[in-house]
């Protein structure tokens, strides 16, 4: 049995993580901490768990083996370093932290403690995204020249996100720091090392953080990624397009089309594959399995740091109105 503490209900995914853990069978939610006392107490009561107002007191509990971090992104470094130093395994909502310097400190603490670390990269578990990775790795598309990924919804437009979602001090950013994480970590996974980045962020609903954003990223392999995200678009279908020297993949709203010189296609046309890679367990369930069965986590410290590297550079590019080059 894995005894878990939920560290804050700030993030909108926190409740879903709690439901996933409670339905697992080998996980018990033992305690809750929250930077907002009333919210934390109410959540703990609903989960049938203890509430601890003091984080250090919670982390000292022997009946807590691991923590799920859904605190404001600006608090991630302090919370996760404390958890690691207390010997607790860690699962965190993306983004890992606001800066690569914070990621490095988290990583050092986790490695020194020898605890398991996992981050929520759900797009890397889905059949369509796994299929795209397979085509790239097998060079079915040749050399990738352009990658376009779009992820958006109308949360800011129709006000169904909590208002603190737009608090820059807590969140660290807006649409790109939230929904933009998914196309960002996919771009890194597909294309490797980034070379330079430009950003264009907009404030359609006049909040303190951006609600509509686009980044152009050049990678060391000469591929270009267009990363698009928005909180002000109506019924946005997800979009993943990969253009290569020998083929093209188009995925839109779960419709898949591919063409390639390397496939046996009649008249060089398009096909819609009837079999995709099997869906993998959600990241939080993979993390539980990694902890209980001493397995490697497929996306952890390195992947989380790479995401933050892209995000940090994206915000610098926006704020300073310039191209940012990666070291």
Image (cartoon, rainbow, N blue to C red):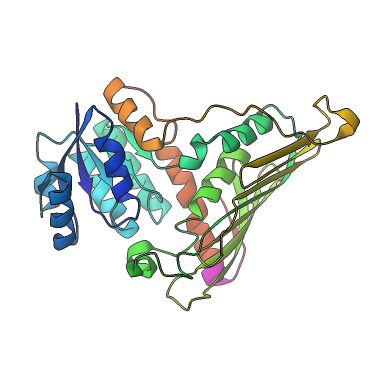
Is 278 located above or below residue 99 in the figure? above
Q: What stretch of residues is rendered in magenta?
A: 318-322
User: Could you say where residue 176 lies in the image, as x and y percent from the top left?
Assistant: 50, 60
Q: Is residue 104 magenta?
A: no
Q: Quadrant of residue 139?
A: top right
Residue located 57% across and 52% down the image? 326
Residue located 61% across and 34% down the image? 133
Q: Quadrant of residue 22?
A: top left
Residue located 30% across and 50% down the image? 14
* Residue most extreme to the top: 293
Report the front residue among 315 and 240.
240
Locate the N terminus by quadrant. Answer: top left
Report the front residue among 242 and 282.
282
Q: Is residue 311 left or right of residue 142?
A: left
User: Could you say where residue 246 lies in the image, as x and y percent from the top left?
Assistant: 81, 35
Is 57 located above or below residue 29 in the figure? below
Magenta segment, prevailing SS (helix, strand or loop)? helix
Q: Is residue 321 magenta?
A: yes
Is 1 located above or below residue 87 in the figure? above
User: Could you say where residue 95 lies in the image, as x and y percent from the top left?
Assistant: 41, 51
Q: Is residue 129 left or right of residue 292?
A: right
């Amino acid at each position: 049995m894995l005894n878990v503490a939920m560290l804050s209900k700030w993030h909108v995914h926190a409740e879903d993580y709690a439901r996933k853990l409670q339905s697992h069978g080998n996980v018990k939610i033992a305690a809750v901490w929250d930077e907002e006392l009333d919210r934390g107490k109410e959540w703990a009561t609903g989960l049938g768990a203890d509430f601890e107002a003091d984080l250090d007191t919670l982390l000292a509990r022997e009946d807590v083996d691991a923590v799920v971090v859904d605190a404001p992104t600006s608090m991630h470094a302090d919370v996760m370093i404390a958890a690691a130093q207390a010997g607790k395994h860690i699962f965190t909502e993306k983004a890992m932290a606001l800066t690569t310097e914070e990621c490095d400190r988290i990583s050092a603490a986790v490695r020194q403690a020898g605890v398991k670390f996992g981050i929520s990269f759900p797009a890397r578990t889905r059949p369509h995204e796994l299929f795209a990775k397979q085509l790239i790795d097998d060079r079915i598309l040749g050399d990738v020249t352009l990658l376009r990924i779009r992820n958006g919804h109308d949360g800011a437009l129709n006000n169904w996100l909590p208002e603190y979602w737009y608090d820059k001090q807590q969140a660290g950013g807006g649409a790109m720091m939230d929904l933009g994480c998914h196309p960002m970590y996919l771009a890194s996974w597909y294309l490797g090392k980034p070379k330079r980045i430009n950003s264009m962020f907009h404030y359609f609903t006049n909040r303190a953080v951006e609600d509509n954003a686009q980044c152009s990223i050049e990678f060391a392999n000469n591929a270009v990624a267009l990363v698009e995200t928005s909180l002000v678009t109506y019924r946005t279908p997800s979009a993943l397009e990969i253009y290569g020297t020998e083929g093209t993949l188009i995925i839109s709203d779960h419709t898949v089309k591919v063409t390639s010189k390397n496939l046996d296609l009649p008249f060089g046309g398009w096909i819609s594959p009837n079999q995709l890679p099997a869906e993998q367990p959600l990241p939080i369930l993979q993390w539980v399995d990694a902890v209980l069965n001493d397995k490697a986590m497929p996306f952890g410290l390195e992947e989380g740091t790479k995401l933050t590297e892209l995000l940090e550079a994206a915000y610098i590019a926006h704020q300073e109105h310039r191209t940012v080059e990666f070291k």
